[in-house]
């Protein structure tokens, strides 16, 4: 049996809508992109939504729109996909890494508070919390700190669609939220991203900046008189637009989102029960939080003292984690580490002279996390195959 790490949910609806832009001839951002943005705002409760070519470009646009530039600093967790850090570097600003809470894999509030307290120069301008794997960061506390230090918040909610604190959706707590529609996410447009905000002036900046800095979009020119004249270009912009074919795919996917979320949460709940007596520390969900389970990420091993970590113990367990992952792959079960500790990757490690233990909990998560297969239409037979092989291999 072959079990993928995840798989998107498609049917005839996607096929039908994908043909529509081809029939109309409107292939760049157009009516389906607009409909996708509208549906996204309805689902998340965001006042404004704006598509981009991917989440990395969304993060870059968010920082640009907030005026982040050379000489500024932006705090991000070290345990995240490299795109979070890269987006900061694109602006000329410096990514300031913060360690994580190993129980949630999200930014550690105590470490964040200490970083802000030590910033005597006032060069830290923003915080980029990552709502990792589908679990919101401690956004109420982050907002409290941001207000105290007069900082902007860009939520990296690449994994956060369907994630909540109370009744509030991820990506709507900070100044700007950024989402991904990569095939490993809950819904996909192949590649693609989305910005959310409550601020109309920020929305207008997104629309302008993602379209080379144009004063009007192609759709506006098409719908208004005088569209034969080219728009003004008064700011330096980028080409970060979503195509209408991707927009059509997004519209079809939004219609499946409730089904996808329900299926993922159902499978995650089965994992929680089935792995209760295993060495794997399963995902922890704080009270009043709702996890969307973009990924089901465990920590190997639950006997590890998370408050007294040593490199020797982490590296010892890393060998066992890697062996388990290799053995699972050998029987057809796809697994992954959760994500990277960015401070251990060559570019950032060399540029800022980091060592592995600079952010020890992020290093631990890098070396000991394990992502198990999860998708909404996972069958009982597929699930049982995964669990039986985990149990056999561990024992």
Image (tube, grey):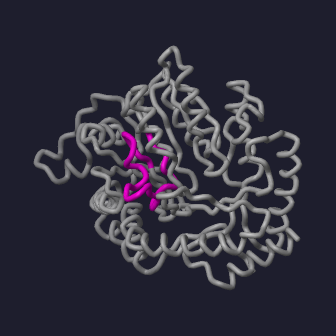
* Residue 388 % position (x, y): 78, 78
Residue 332 lies in quadrant = bottom right
Residue drawn at the location 48% of the way across and 29% of the way down? 91
* Residue 42 % position (x, y): 30, 61
User: Quick check: 353 left or right of 209?
Assistant: right
Residue farthest to the left?
225
Give the vertical position of 317 relative to 21 (above or below).
above
Give the vertical position of 92 relative to 84 (above or below).
above
User: Quick check: 25 left or right of 90?
Assistant: left
Residue farthest to the top?
121
Residue 75 lies in quadrant = top right
**Quadrant assignment for the C terminus:** bottom right
**Quadrant assignment for the N terminus:** bottom right
Total marks placed:
0
Magenta-tinted stretch: 154-178
Closest to the observer: 265 or 30?
Answer: 265
Magenta segment, prevailing SS (helix, strand or loop) = loop
Residue drawn at the location 63% of the way across and 63% of the way down? 296
Q: Is residue 166 magenta?
A: yes
Residue drawn at the location 42% of the way across and 38% of the way down? 143
Q: Is residue 336 magenta?
A: no
User: Quick check: 288 left or right of 331?
Assistant: left
* Residue 371 % position (x, y): 69, 61
* Residue 166 % position (x, y): 41, 57
Residue farthest to the bottom?
381
Residue 209 lies in quadrant = top left
Closest to the observer: 55 or 286?
Answer: 286
């Amino acid at each position: 049996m072959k079990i993928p790490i995840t798989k998107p949910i498609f049917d005839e609806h996607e096929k039908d809508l994908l043909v529509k832009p081809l029939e109309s001839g409107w292939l760049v951002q157009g009516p389906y992109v607009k409909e996708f943005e509208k549906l996204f705002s309805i689902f998340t409760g965001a006042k404004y939504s704006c598509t981009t070519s991917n989440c990395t470009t969304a993060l870059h646009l968010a920082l640009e729109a907030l005026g982040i530039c050379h000489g500024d600093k932006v705090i991000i967790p070290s345990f995240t996909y490299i795109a979070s850090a890269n987006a900061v570097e694109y602006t000329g600003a410096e990514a300031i890494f913060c360690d994580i809470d190993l129980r949630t894999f999200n930014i550690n509030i105590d470490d964040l508070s200490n970083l802000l307290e030590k910033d005597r120069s006032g060069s830290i301008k923003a915080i980029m919390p990552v709502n990792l794997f589908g679990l919101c960061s401690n956004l109420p506390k982050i907002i409290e700190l941001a207000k105290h230090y007069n900082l902007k918040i860009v939520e990296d909610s690449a994994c956060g669609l369907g994630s909540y604190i109370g009744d509030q959706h991820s990506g709507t707590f900070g100044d700007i939220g950024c989402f991904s529609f990569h095939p490993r996410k809950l819904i996909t447009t192949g590649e693609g991203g989305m910005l959310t905000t409550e601020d109309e002036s920020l929305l207008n900046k997104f629309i302008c900046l993602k379209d080379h800095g144009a004063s009007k979009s192609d759709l506006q020119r098409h719908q208004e008189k005088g569209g034969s004249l080219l728009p003004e270009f008064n700011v330096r912009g980028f080409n970060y637009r979503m195509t209408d074919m991707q927009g059509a795919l997004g519209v079809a996917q939004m219609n499946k989102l409730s089904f996808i979320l329900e299926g993922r949460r159902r499978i995650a709940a089965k994992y929680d029960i089935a792995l209760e007596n295993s060495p794997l520390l399963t995902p922890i969900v704080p009270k009043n939080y709702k996890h969307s389970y973009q990924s089901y990420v465990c920590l190997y091993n639950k006997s590890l003292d998370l408050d007294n970590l040593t490199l020797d113990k982490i590296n010892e367990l890393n060998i066992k984690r890697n062996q388990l992952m290799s053995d699972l792959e050998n029987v057809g079960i796809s697994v992954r580490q959760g994500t990277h500790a960015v401070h251990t990757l060559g570019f950032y490690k060399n540029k800022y002279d980091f060592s592995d233990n600079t952010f020890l909990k992020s290093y631990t998560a890098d070396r000991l996390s394990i992502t198990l297969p999860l998708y909404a239409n996972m069958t009982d037979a597929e699930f049982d195959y995964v669990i039986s092989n985990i149990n056999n291999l561990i024992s």
